[in-house]
Image (spheres, rainbow, N blue to C red):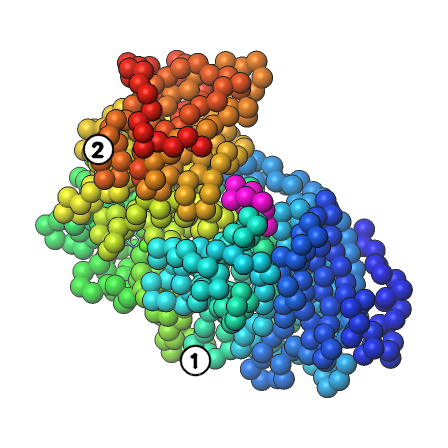
Amino acid sequence: MIRLVLAALLLFIGHAAQAQVVYSAATGATARSPDGKIIVTMRLDGEGRPEYSILRGGHTVIDWSRMGFILADAPKLERNFALERVEEKAIDETWEQPWGERRFIRNHCTEQRVSIREKIGQRRAVTVVFRVFDDGVGFRYEFPEQAALPQVNIVDELTEFAVAESATAWWIPGGEWNRYEYLYNKTPLAEVGQAHTPLTIRTASGLHIAFHEAALVDYSAMWLRRVSGQRLKALLSPSSSGPKVSRKAPFATPWRTLQIADSAPGLYMSDLILSLNEPNKLGDVSWVKPFKYVGIWWGMHLGTETWSSGPKHGATTAETKRYIDFAAANGFRGVLVEGWNKGWDGDWFASGKDFSFTEAYPDFDIVALAAYAKKKGVRLVGHHETAGNIAVYEKQLGPALDLYAKLGIDAVKTGYVADAGGVQALGEDGRIHFEWHDGQVQSRHHLRVVEEAAKRHISINAHEPIKDTGLRRTYPNWVAREGARGMEYNAWGDPPNPPEHEVNLVFTRMLSGPMDYTPGVLSLTGAAGRRIQSTVARQLALYVVLYSPIQMAADLPENYAKHQKPFQFIKDVPVDWSETRVLNGEVGDYATIVRKDRNSDDWYLGAITDEVPRTLQAHLSFLDEGKKYYATMYRDGKNAGFEGDGQSLEIETRPVSRYDTLQLKLAPGGGQAIRISTNLGSRGPRSSPKPKPKKPPPEFDVE
Ligand code: NOJ
Ligand code: CA
C-alpha cells in the first residue's frame, strides 16, 4: 500500500513557497526501519541541493551527505531542486533462494520514494528511492522518462557518505591495475585513499558498517574516494567513451548500500543486498546445480603443467580421464579443464586475440571426454579464458556455448586476465576500445554472457570479474566469481596470502556474494615447494567459511591420495545450505560460521583465525532439541601453525547436543572444521584414536 506521508508538508511544498520550505529542516523526508532504530532523512539544503543523513539508535551514523550527478552534455543535476512528492510503503515478504547460504530470506523494510524537480532551467526530475531495513539502508536514483533528459550521460555521481564517528577501515585500492586482487589495508578511515567496495568500517563505539552496492546493471561500478576527513564520495569506474555511464531514461542506478550492525557477524548475516535485487528472471532454474569439482588447474599454477600446447600440456585426453576417474571415485560432480582450447600458445595474457572457444587442441578429445564423463556420472566444467578480449569472445559466444550445451557441459568458468583498463571491447564505431573490468561496458558484457548461458541451461563462474552485487537473485545461473586474491596467490603470489587475508575476506569481499576461492590444497605446497601459510584443518574450514555454491578441491589427485583422512571432510561437506549463522568473528581477526545442509539435518562448522592462536567457543544451541548428533572435528594438532607443522591434525568424533559448547583451539594461521551429523554410520570418518587429554598450551588465549 502506498501512502503519502507528511501531508501537511506536501501541501507546503507543492506550491510557490517551495524555496522557503526546502530551506527549513522541517522539510526533511524521514523514513524509519521496521524496528524504528534506523532513521534516514533526505532534505534539500539552502541551494536546493539534495542531501541525506542516517541515524541509528538516536546517534548520527552518516552526517549530511550530498547527492546528485555531473552530466557530460547538460548542466549538473545537483542543485536548485524542490521536493515534489514523498511516498512511503512497507515491504515485508519472504522469498526463497534456489540455492544459497540460507533457503528463505525476509525482505523487510520501509521504502520511501522522494521525488524532486528543478525549480529553474530545464526542470528536470529525479526520484531517490530509499529502503530502510533493520540492518541497513539502500538507496538509488531513478531517472524518469522526460523530454528535458531523454539520454543521461553521467560523468560522475556526487553521492557522498560522511561517516560521523571516527572509524577503522578495511579496504583494497580501487582503480589500480590488479583489479580486486589486493591484500586488505587496515587503516583509520581518515587515511583511506580510493577504495573498492565492500569497504568495511568499525567505529570507535563498535558499530560496523559495510558500504557496497546492489544490482549493478548497465552501469559503472562505484569506487569510494575519501574527499576529506571521513567523507567518502562515489567515484564511478571509467569508460573509454567519456561519460562513465550512458543510459536512456527511464532507468535506475544501482542501489548504494550500507549494512549496519553492532558486530562483524551482524554484517555477515544481513541479506539486504540480495533483497534489493530483482527477483529471479529465469523462471525454473532447477537446472542450476550447486556442485563440487576438481580440475586440471593447480598443476599450471605450480608450473608443472602448461595451458599451452607442448610436452607439459595439462589438458590432454589421458590426464582428463585421470581426473574424471578421480572425480567419479570421490563423489565430485565436476571436472574443470583449463588450456583445452586453441589460443594459449604465445603471449595470450591481455591479448586473447588467438583464442578459439570451439576448437580443442588435438591432444584433447572433447567429444570423447564428455561422453566418458557422462558414463562415469561426472560433467566436464567448461573454461573460457578471454584475457579480457571480449571482442573476440562475444563474436564466438553463441557457438561456444552451443558446443558446451551439446556436450552436456552445464557450467563454465570464464576469465578476464588483463590489467584493469585492459578489457578490449568492440565499440559502436567498429573499433577496439579499452575498458575497465568494472565499467559499464563490462557490466553489460557479463550479463550478456549470463543470459546467453541461461538460454542453454549453463551456469557461469567468472574470474577477474566485475564485483558481485547480488545479481545471483535475478540470474541464479551466475553461481560464483572470483574478484579477490584467491588460492592461486599461494602458488605464485608475491607475497602469498597471509593468514589474515582469508579472515579479512569474510567481512569484506564475502559480504558481496559467493567466491570461487578454490580451497583444499592439503599438500600446503605452492610453486617450487613454497609453504602455504595455512594448516590442513584450516583448508577444510574454508569450505564452510568462504561460501560458494560451487567449491573446488583444488589440489592434485596424487596429493589427496596422501591425505585421505582430511580429504574425507572435503568429500562430505555440502555446498548448498538451508541456514547460516555466524557464531563469532571480528573483522580481520577470526570467524566461526555454521551452516545447515540443505539436503539433510547435518550442520557444518568452519572457524579460522589470523596469525594469532585462539580458543573460540561454539555454543551448539542451533542444533535441534532432542536430536542426537555426532561431531567429527578436524582440528589443528600439536605444534600446528602457518609457520609450524601445517599437517598436524587431530580428528575426533563424539556425540553432541544443543546443550554443548565446544572449545575450538585454533593454531596460528589455523582453523577447525566440524561435521555435525545425525548419522554416525554415514560417509564421515569413524572416530580416530582420541588424543591424550592435555592442558591447553599457554599460547592459546581463551575468549
Ligand atoms: C586466472 C584465474 O583466476 C585462474 O583460476 C585461471 O587458472 C587463470 N586465470 C587462467 O585462466
Ligand atoms: Ca584470478
Rendered image quadrant of residue 647: top left
- Would you call the spot at circle 1 few (<14 residues within 10 Å), some (14-19), or many (20 or more)? few
- Residue 618 point in image, percent of width and height: 47, 27
Q: In this view, does 20 lie above or below 643?
A: below
SS under mark 1:
loop
Q: Give the range drawn in magenta.
A: 260-267
Residue drawn where x is 48% and y is 32% of the image:
594
Disc ID at residue 645: 2
Q: Is residue 321 visible?
A: no
Q: Looking at numbered disc 2 in the image, what kind of residue is underneath it?
A: Asp
- Residue 697 point in image, percent of width and height: 30, 27
In the image: residue 422, left or right of residue 162 = left
Task: Tell me the quarter of the image containing the C terminus.
Answer: top left
- Residue 472 point in image, percent of width and height: 52, 49
Depth check: 445 or 89 in front? Answer: 89
Residue drawn where x is 53% and y is 77% of the image:
155
Tell whether label 1 touches label 2 (CB within 8 Å).
Answer: no
Q: Looking at numbered disc 1 in the image, what kind of residue is underneath it?
A: Asp
Q: Can residue 128 be seen in this view?
A: yes
Disc ID at residue 429: 1
Q: In this view, does 4 lie above or below 508?
A: below
Which dot, 2 or 1, sits closer to the camera?
Answer: 2
In the image: residue 118, left or right of residue 9 = left
- Would you call the spot at circle 2 few (<14 residues within 10 Å), some (14-19), or many (20 or more)? some
